[in-house]
């Protein structure tokens, strides 16, 4: 293949990879859990774009390897043209990876900013307290506290379609709040103020766990998050106020 055609081919394939980084939300999740929050959707989009970019780069590399094997396989002791360098091709395979990394960095930074952004007026606030080896969920202003016990995991109840502020508090050692369906986790560190906002988008019950080894019974630190419609949430609060759990 002439150098000019090879350069154009590499350039086109590189641009294709950059374009697919911004894959639409209707594309397959490519192994990520179906997100149940707006923040999770942002992370899923980043994950999808990164995987697609990796697949495109892999296809380019394997395609070039196979092409070179077929194109330059030995024929009757013929030796292919020898050239110490090819400036156009070398420029392309240097510039394209730099562009891919730059685009990945841009979308990663943008997603990080979006996911970490907090609302000035959240609809619901929950204090999440991690301690060896259970969880406690406090609803400030509602006089509701849910505490986990060895006999059963605690349940955090949230309204769907609302912005939930989670204040993460470590009572003893480091813990990590992780709900896989939210596609994000955040550490609880003693003495460090840590908050995240979750914009719930889907009703259902989701498993949560501590993702930071915190001692002998770390494995016990499971909890559940139940997302319900707002009227059911209000009814749950009223029931908890009458019969604290």
Image (spheres, helix red, strand yellow):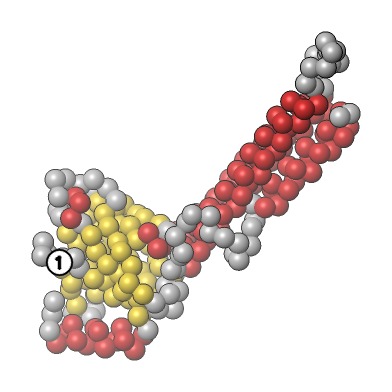
Say few, some or many: other residues with alpha carbon within 10 Å of mark 1 (under 14 / 14 to 19 / 20 or more): few
- Whether 154 is drawn above or below 214: the answer is below
Residue 236 seen in the figure: yes
- Please indicate whether residue 46 sits to the left or right of residue 132 in the image: right
At horizontal 25% and vertical 51% (from top left) the residue drawn is 175
In the rendered image, residue 160, in percent from the top left (x then y), is placed at 40, 78
> Of helix, strand and loop, which one carries label 1?
loop
At horizontal 11% and vertical 61% (from top left) the residue drawn is 150
Foreground pick, 194 / 82? 82
- Whether 105 is drawn above or below 88: the answer is below
At horizontal 78% and vertical 21% (from top left) the residue drawn is 73
At horizontal 71% and vertical 36% (from top left) the residue drawn is 63
Residue sitting at the far front: 76
- Please indicate whether residue 245 sits to the left or right of residue 178 in the image: left
- The quadrant the N terminus occupies is top right
- Whether 233 is drawn above or below 42: the answer is below
Foreground pick, 54 / 184? 54
Q: Which residue is mark 1?
A: 152
């Amino acid at each position: 293949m002439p150098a000019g055609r090879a350069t154009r081919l590499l350039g086109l394939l590189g641009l294709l990879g950059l374009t697919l980084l911004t894959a639409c939300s209707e594309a397959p999740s490519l192994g990520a859990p179906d997100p149940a929050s707006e923040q999770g959707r942002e992370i899923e989009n980043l994950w999808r774009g990164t995987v697609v970019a990796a697949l495109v780069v892999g296809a380019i590399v394997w395609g070039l390897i196979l092409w070179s094997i077929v194109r330059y396989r030995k024929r009757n002791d013929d030796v292919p043209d020898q050239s110490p360098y090819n400036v156009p091709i070398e420029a392309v395979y240097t510039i394209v990876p730099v562009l891919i990394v730059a685009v990945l960095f841009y979308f990663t930074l943008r997603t990080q900013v979006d996911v970490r952004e907090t609302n000035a007026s959240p609809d619901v606030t929950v204090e999440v307290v991690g301690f060896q080896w259970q969880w406690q969920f406090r609803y400030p202003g509602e006089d509701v506290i849910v505490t986990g016990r060895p006999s059963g995991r605690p349940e955090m109840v949230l309204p769907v379609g609302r912005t939930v502020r989670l204040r993460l508090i470590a009572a003893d050692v480091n813990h990590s709040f992780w709900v896989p369906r939210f596609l994000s986790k955040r550490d609880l560190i003693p003495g460090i103020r840590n908050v995240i906002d979750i914009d719930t988008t889907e009703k259902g019950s989701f498993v949560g766990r501590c993702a930071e080894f915190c001692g002998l019974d770390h494995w016990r630190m499971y909890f559940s998050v139940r997302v319900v419609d707002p009227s059911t949430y209000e009814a749950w609060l009223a029931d908890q106020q009458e019969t604290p759990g």
